[in-house]
Image: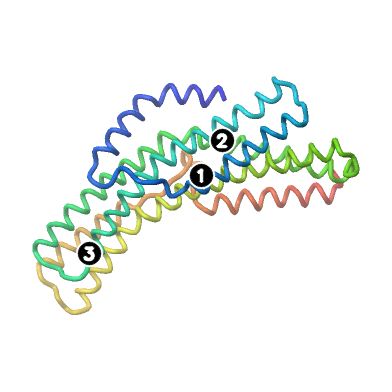
Amino acid sequence: MITNFCVFYKRTPQLKLLLFKIYTTEGPTKQLSNYLKLYFVLLTTVNLMFACSQILGLSVPLQLSINIPIVANVFELVFVGDVISTLQEKFRSVNKLLQMEQEHLTRQSICRLQKISHQHYDLVGLAKQANYIFGVTFLTGMATLVCSAIDGIYFTLYIYANYSNNFESFKFFVFNIIWLGSQISWLYVLIKLWSDSEEEANAVSGYIHDMWNKYTTNNDLCIYIRHLELIAIRCAGTKVKFTAKDFVPLDWNLMHTVVAALATYVVILIQFKF
């Protein structure tokens, strides 16, 4: 939490400038978030955890130590989702423009493609800047997730194996399950946000190369095709790869790694009878 609050304060000037650039860049800016259902599931698990902590009668300091970090991470994720969704819409509008230009290639369309490639380059720069600004909180959030997941899995298995017939222990068992669910939901939404954005951003080079291949296979090597070749090379060189401060990639490989690590931990606990 201390790290998060320090980062919140330090990144404010950079974040204000980033938001100004995003909302003044050409393209759609207002849209209904595509992740409302995921946000609803995530907030539901958090509310269930609050309810369970009240039912269990946990002390107020313990409730605060458990709930405040999770709430901070959730609201941080929702805020990031709003920013990234806006960038996604702008990338999606660029892709739609490219699809419209695929039919006929003329001098005017080459000029439009040049403009679109410049717009894409600016959006990639903004996306990389957003990834850099939010990288520290993602890294601390994932470290917290792994530590809490390890604790939650251990206590869940321990309670299930030794106190499964005790109703009070059963309530702690349910609380741990909901806690794990909230952590996994947070990671799923985080990865989906950045993975979808990366896919939209990198789709541009595919459209440009499709246009280039379409005309070169017809032996149409006019000056327009040469210009299109330069645009294709530039778009291929501006692909993005989102990471958490270059430690881990923010894609589905991370989800697979976390699930595999936790599954291995469960197997080890069972073998040693925890």
Percent across and percent down for residue 174 are 76, 41
Q: Mark 1, residues whose alpha carbon is within 10 Å: few (<14), some, or many (≥20)?
A: many
Q: Circle 3 sits on which residue?
A: 100
N-terminal of the pair, mark 2 or mark 1, is: 2
200 left or right, relative to 26: right
Pick the quarter of the image with the N terminus. top right
Q: Which mark is residue 145?
A: none
Q: Nearer the viewer, mark 1 or mark 3?
A: 3
Q: Nearer the viewer, mark 2 or mark 3?
A: 3
Cα separation, mark 2 vs mark 1, equals 10 Å
Percent across and percent down for residue 173 are 79, 41
Amino acid at the residue labelled 2? Gly
N-terminal of the pair, mark 2 or mark 3, is: 3
Q: Circle 1 sits on which residue?
A: 190
Amino acid at the residue labelled 3? Met
| SS class, disc 2 | helix
Q: Please state which of residues 28 and 2 is positioned toward the viewer in this rendering.
A: 28
Q: Who's the residue at 45% across and 47% down the image? A: 194
Point out the residue furthest to the bottom here: 218
Percent across and percent down for residue 23 are 28, 38
Amino acid at the residue labelled 1? Leu
Q: Is residue 236 above or below residue 143?
A: below
Q: Are marks 2 and 1 in contact (CB under 8 Å)?
A: yes
Q: Please state which of residues 105 and 172 is positioned toward the viewer in this rendering.
A: 172
Q: Please state which of residues 264 and 168 is positioned toward the viewer in this rendering.
A: 168
222 left or right, relative to 243: left
Q: Mark 2, residues whose alpha carbon is within 10 Å: few (<14), some, or many (≥20)?
A: many
Cα separation, mark 1 vs mark 3, equals 32 Å
Pick the quarter of the image with the C terminus. top right
Q: Circle 2 sits on which residue?
A: 141
